Image: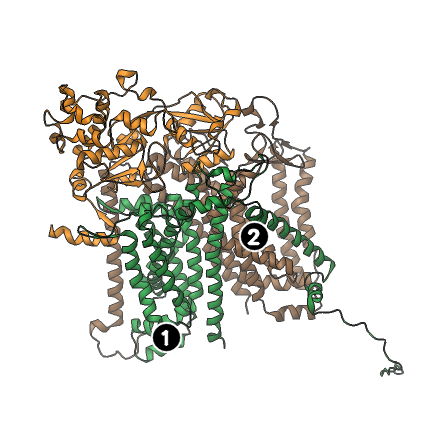
């Protein structure tokens, strides 16, 4: 497509690739502008004619409805904007916990898929095939509506160690109560993390220079877990546990767990997180399997020849190379999980889409709400692809 | 006509319906030959399809009455099932001609959504349903309860107000679809199911053991349910308004589906005006003068519709109560035809 | 040191080694694959326990305790109030027509059957690599079939002459809606996806930019917000009085959404075509479209058939989301049947969901097998 040194004989404008390119692009812009104009004028005209208010002012108005789970203080008197923010945080919470569980389960299943053990191998195979070929929404319904009926009703419970209790109202456990002095523990954790990071860098430099290894795992564990525990005892145990109150007697409605005591994971959250993690884990398992298989067999043989045992072979040779193949599709699965968390709307978990839908109904401001949805999810996916680009670049440096 | 033809063909081929929503809805309706009516996705007694897809219910009867008054045919109506979220957009965009979907008349909906309520065809109020074995007899005992309801309706706001006003803690679980609320309540997720009292009676039929549940006496809100039309077409608004009024007036005057032909001979001037043998009230609406006769002949009066769909002899078993005529202790009061 | 005898000479016969552990036959196989070490043996037993505790209750529920015949809920209630009965297949049987046709009028259901039959008859030979007349078949399937199916399903009335009475889309439901959305979505998104993929690889900056923005936008948002947008916001975009059928609105949303995914699949195929193919085509003096149409796309599309099938599986599963915007696909129809007091039993929900899971699994698993089959078949041609 590059220009040649001596100018070619003037082709007619019709056949000049540059002119044609300009023409097509101009046409595209014209069409886009026309469509945009069409949509915007129609929308404005429709909104005006139907006397529907528009603009972002409604975000300040009082919401008036309750939300069952809020990570930040929220009451019926809070604003619509606050309600949407609560929904956004709930989306992030489901995504974060879902990603955590899905990653662990996915890696376990992916490695199990490669196991020599026939039983384990087949279980992992059918897990992956079954879960991947059944719609997620159906799985969410299954966990919420079918499994929900199987757990005890509100007036009874299943208990684990007498600490965690499951019934139809959710999973209850003790809630931590932070007393003065507890912030020291937080600082201890931060210091532990920073120290681990610094020591790790130092250990790497030393290993590169001298070949001496440093027991990084135990040191890190000691710093990250040990320091806060130490701080906890030094400060005289500033964190206490509030156990949920379970009433066995009294009026029927009062029996069961008292509202607001202990820590409660509502069943909507449990069902959604479980369904999302199990579903996404099946995809992650396939990614992990493909990633490990992508590492040439010679690598394993070479590691064996060096006398590495099975564990170190996996940890030091196979996984680091497989990760390069695994990470990009893995991030896009994380993104899928986040987007799929919008199915919360089907089972009453107050995520961004679900709360937004309520606000949409109360105010009728469809354009603004849908714009908020799109903006949030697009930003999340933009952030993810930025991370992926960064990661790919970093990995590219390691390559020969 | 020829100018309209091409877009019509193209539109038909693409499944696009082009109607000029703003101008004269009546003319459009007459041209296409049926009334497009927005209804619920299935609420027994109000608008519910049977296994063959035939719709019935109090709200459906209103649509049929409108069709009867225009076409002399109660079946010249098509139904669009709509969720709570879609209903107003569907009406505003002209997808439907009238919305008859147990919709509460509120001030915001009148002022900022561009809607006109044609009246009230059922005076409702929000109530609570609980399991009998909870031993609760009043809504004021519901402190600490978890409440299942539909999202995005006035119900959700009312329940928040009620519990707040009475200083009772509560937990709300709000679902997108009524069927999901019923399923969750039936599974025992919530202690309380709240929606319009009429809806409670209707949804109770869908529970595993309807007999195990009771509706509490408290009504915590006013929910006047009525048919809705777009703003900006007064003629169509009038037709909707007076279709409803004609049904109520017919009951008041004792004109029923069975005796309507006989009543034609009546000397009562009110009856004569209603049935079109005196005056030209129908023409003033843009319809024929026997418009109300058609309504009663094909659909019946309000009382008949009530009894057939939600009354004591139906599975819903709702008493007339506040929905009785003003002369019988209720609040139904239609302006006179004169 | 020097005295060390470096040659070892065996003075007597080495002791006989025991015969090697059998590596063939059932025992040998089990020894190798199940009990090769202590850890492995433990794993095997753990896995067997896990499989047993999942499969046995399932068989118990779906077959042993299941109720196969009956006219109403009485048949499916457990005789002992403290236990649950098994799957209530009688309910699925009673509702099967609704699950397949939705509320399509009974008299007209033969039309849906014709469409189903045409769909299978045209699709199967298209999918079989050995079947003849591919071009004709593709034209029939992609051009003739949609038109015929459209008129069969919606109805055809010319003036007062009624060929097929009109059936509104509000009455459609069940598997019919699932298939209509999935098939239309994939067929309509294919050309759009190809155009977008070409646009994304274009050298014209604006076309490239627009394609990228379009693709990334639709890939970045969840389908459910797209469906909300098409059901709530699309009417606002249109001039006063112009309305779309609800199903059509959903179809538009689904098509735009899946075209972005399709574009990425096709782009993968385009990238896999060696540069020499482009250069060869240009050297022959072909212009852009002939080059694409004759040289590049046939190769690229063949390569991405598995990818297209996978996109289709995803779309097929995603059609269930339309129930959230109030349409009755298979899952929506099943869910709405739960509110029938005539059949409501504690196991109704389990049965309905199990039925849906089986249907979706059969469809999707079949398609993924096909995709693997094609992958293997196509792979051979490109292996060097």
Badge 2 and badge 1 in a common chain: no
The hue used for chain B is orange
Of all residues, the one furthest to the left in this rendering is: B279
Residue at image position (68%, 44%) is: A226
Eyeballing the image, is C212 above or below B222? below
Distance Cα–Cα, label 2 vs label 1: 41 Å
Residue at image position (59%, 56%) is: A124
In the rendered image, residue C262, in percent from the top left (x then y), is placed at: 39, 60
According to the colouring, which chain is brown?
A: A
Query: Does the rendering let one see residue C310?
Result: yes
Quadrant where the N terminus of chain C sits is bottom right
- State the residue in front, C299 or A95: C299
Q: Which residue is mark 1?
A: C278
Q: Residue under mark 2: which chain is it in?
A: A
- State the residue in front, B58 or C222: B58
Query: How dense is the environment of label 2, judged by Cα within 10 Å: few (below 14), some, or many (20 and up)?
Result: many
Label 1 secondary element: helix
Whether pointer 2 and pointer 1 mark residues with C-beta atoms closer than 8 Å, the reply is no
Eyeballing the image, is C273 above or below A219? below
- State the residue in front, C163 or A3: C163
Q: Residue under mark 1: which chain is it in?
A: C
Query: How dense is the environment of label 1, judged by Cα within 10 Å: few (below 14), some, or many (20 and up)?
Result: some
According to the colouring, which chain is green?
A: C
State which quadrant residue A343 falls in: top left
State which quadrant residue C271 falls in: bottom left
In the rendered image, residue C127, in percent from the top left (x then y), is placed at: 41, 66
Q: How many marks?
A: 2
Q: Which residue is mark 2?
A: A103
């Amino acid at each position: 497509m590059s220009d040649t040194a001596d100018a070619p004989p003037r082709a007619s404008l019709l056949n000049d690739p540059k002119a044609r390119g300009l023409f097509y692009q101009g046409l595209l812009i014209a069409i886009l502008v026309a469509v945009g104009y069409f949509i915007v004028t129609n929308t404005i005209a429709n909104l005006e004619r139907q006397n529907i208010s528009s603009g972002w002012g409604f975000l300040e108005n009082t919401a008036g409805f309750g939300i069952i789970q809020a990570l930040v203080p929220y009451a019926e008197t809070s604003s619509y904007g606050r309600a949407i923010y609560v929904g956004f945080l709930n989306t992030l919470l489901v995504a974060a916990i879902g990603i955590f569980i899905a990653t662990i389960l996915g890696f376990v299943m992916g490695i199990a898929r490669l196991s020599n053990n026939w039983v384990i191998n087949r279980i992992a195979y059918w897990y992956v095939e079954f879960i991947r070929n059944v719609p997620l929404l159906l799985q969410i319904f299954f966990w919420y509506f079918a499994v929900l009926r199987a757990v005890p009703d509100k007036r009874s419970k299943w208990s684990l160690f007498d600490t965690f209790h499951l019934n139809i109202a959710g999973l209850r456990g003790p809630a931590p109560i932070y007393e003065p002095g507890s912030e020291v523990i937080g600082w201890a954790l931060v210091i532990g993390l920073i120290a681990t990071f610094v020591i790790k860098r130092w250990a790497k430099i030393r290993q590169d220079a001298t070949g001496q290894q440093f027991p990084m795992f135990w040191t890190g564990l000691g710093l990250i877990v040990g320091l806060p525990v130490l701080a906890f005892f030094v400060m005289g145990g500033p964190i206490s546990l509030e156990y949920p109150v379970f009433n066995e007697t009294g009026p029927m409605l009062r029996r069961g767990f008292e509202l607001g005591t202990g820590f409660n994971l509502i069943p909507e959250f449990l069902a959604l997180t479980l369904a999302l993690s199990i579903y996404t884990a099946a995809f992650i398992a396939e990614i992990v399997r493909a990633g490990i298989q992508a590492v040439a067999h010679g690598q394993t043989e070479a590691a064996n020849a060096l006398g590495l045992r099975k564990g170190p072979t996996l940890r030091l040779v196979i996984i680091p190379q497989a990760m390069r193949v695994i990470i990009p599709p893995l991030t896009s699965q994380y993104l899928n999980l986040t987007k799929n968390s919008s199915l919360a709307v089907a089972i009453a978990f107050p995520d961004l889409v679900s709360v937004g839908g309520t606000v949409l109904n109360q105010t009728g401001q469809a354009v603004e709400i849908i714009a908020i949805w799109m903006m949030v999810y697009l930003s999340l996916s933009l952030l993810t692809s930025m991370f992926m680009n960064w990661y790919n670049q970093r990995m590219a440096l390691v390559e020969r | 006509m020829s100018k309209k033809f091409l877009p019509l063909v193209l539109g038909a081929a693409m499944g696009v319906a082009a109607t000029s929503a703003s101008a004269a809805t009546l003319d459009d309706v007459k041209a296409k030959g049926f009334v497009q009516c927005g209804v619920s996705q299935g609420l027994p007694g109000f608008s519910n399809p049977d296994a063959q897809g035939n719709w019935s219910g109090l709200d459906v009867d209103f649509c049929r009455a409108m069709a009867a008054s225009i076409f002399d045919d109660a079946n010249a109506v098509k139904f669009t099932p709509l969720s709570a979220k879609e209903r107003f957009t569907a009406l505003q965009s002209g997808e439907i001609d009238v919305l008859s979907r147990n919709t509460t008349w509120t001030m915001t909906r009148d002022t900022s959504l561009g809607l006109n309520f044609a009246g009230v065809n059922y005076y409702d109020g929000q109530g609570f349903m609980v399991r009998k074995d909870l031993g609760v007899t009043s809504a004021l005992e519901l402190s600490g309860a978890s409440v299942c309801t539909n999202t995005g309706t006035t119900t959700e706001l009312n329940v928040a107000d009620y519990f707040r006003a009475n200083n009772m803690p509560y937990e709300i679980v709000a679902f997108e679809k009524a069927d999901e609320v019923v399923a969750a309540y039936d599974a025992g997720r919530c202690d309380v199911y709240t929606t319009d009292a009429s809806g409670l009676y209707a949804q109770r039929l869908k529970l595993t053991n309807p007999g195990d549940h009771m509706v509490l006496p408290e009504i915590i809100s006013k929910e006047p349910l009525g048919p809705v039309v777009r703003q900006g077409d007064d003629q169509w608004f009038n037709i909707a308004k007076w279709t409803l009024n004609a049904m109520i007036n017919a009951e008041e005057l004792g004109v029923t589906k069975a005796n309507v032909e006989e009543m034609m001979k009546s000397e009562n001037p009110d009856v004569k005006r209603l049935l079109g043998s005196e005056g030209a009230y129908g023409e003033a609406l843009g319809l024929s003068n026997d418009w109300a006769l058609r309504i009663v002949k094909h659909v019946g009066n309000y009382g008949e519709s009530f009894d057939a769909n939600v009354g004591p002899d139906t599975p819903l078993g709702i008493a007339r109560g506040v929905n009785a005529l003003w002369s019988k202790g209720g609040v139904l009061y239609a302006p006179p035809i004169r | 040191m020097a005295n060390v005898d470096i040659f070892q000479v065996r003075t007597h016969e080495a002791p006989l080694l025991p015969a090697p552990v059998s590596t063939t036959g059932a025992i040998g196989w089990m020894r190798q694959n199940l009990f090769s070490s202590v850890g492995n043996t433990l794993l095997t037993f753990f896995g067997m326990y896990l499989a047993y505790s999942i499969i046995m209750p399932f068989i118990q529920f779906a077959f042993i305790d299941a109720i196969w015949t009956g006219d109403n809920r009485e048949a499916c209630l457990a005789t002992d109030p403290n236990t649950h009965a098994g799957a209530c297949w009688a309910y699925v049987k009673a509702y099967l027509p609704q699950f397949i046709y939705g509320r399509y009028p009974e008299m007209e259901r033969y039309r849906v059957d014709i469409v189903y039959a045409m769909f299978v008859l045209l699709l199967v030979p298209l999918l079989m690599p050995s079947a003849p007349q591919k071009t004709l078949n593709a034209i029939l399937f992609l051009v003739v079939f949609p038109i015929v199916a459209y008129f069969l399903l919606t109805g055809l009335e010319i003036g007062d002459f009624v060929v097929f009475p009109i059936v509104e889309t509000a009455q459609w439901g069940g598997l019919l809606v699932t298939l209509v959305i999935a098939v239309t979505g994939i067929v309509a998104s294919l050309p759009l996806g190809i155009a977008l993929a070409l646009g994304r690889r274009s050298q014209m900056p604006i076309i490239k930019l627009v394609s990228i923005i379009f693709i990334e936008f639709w890939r970045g948002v969840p389908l459910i917000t797209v469906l909300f947008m098409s059901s709530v916001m699309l009417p606002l975009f249109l001039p006063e009085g112009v309305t779309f059928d609800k199903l059509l609105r959903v179809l538009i949303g689904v098509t735009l959404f899946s075209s972005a995914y399709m574009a990425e699949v096709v782009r993968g195929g385009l990238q896999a075509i060696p540069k020499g193919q482009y250069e060869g085509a240009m050297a022959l003096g072909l212009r852009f479209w002939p080059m694409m149409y004759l040289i590049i796309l046939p190769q690229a599309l063949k390569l991405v058939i598995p990818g297209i099938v996978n996109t289709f599986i995803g779309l097929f599963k995603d059609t269930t989301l339309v129930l959230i915007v109030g349409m009755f696909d298979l899952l929506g129809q099943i869910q709405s049947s739960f509110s029938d007091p005539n059949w409501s039993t504690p196991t109704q929900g389990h049965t309905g969901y199990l039925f849906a899971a089986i249907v979706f699994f059969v469809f999707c698993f079949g398609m993924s097998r096909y995709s693997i089959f094609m992958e293997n078949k196509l792979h051979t041609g490109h292996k060097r």
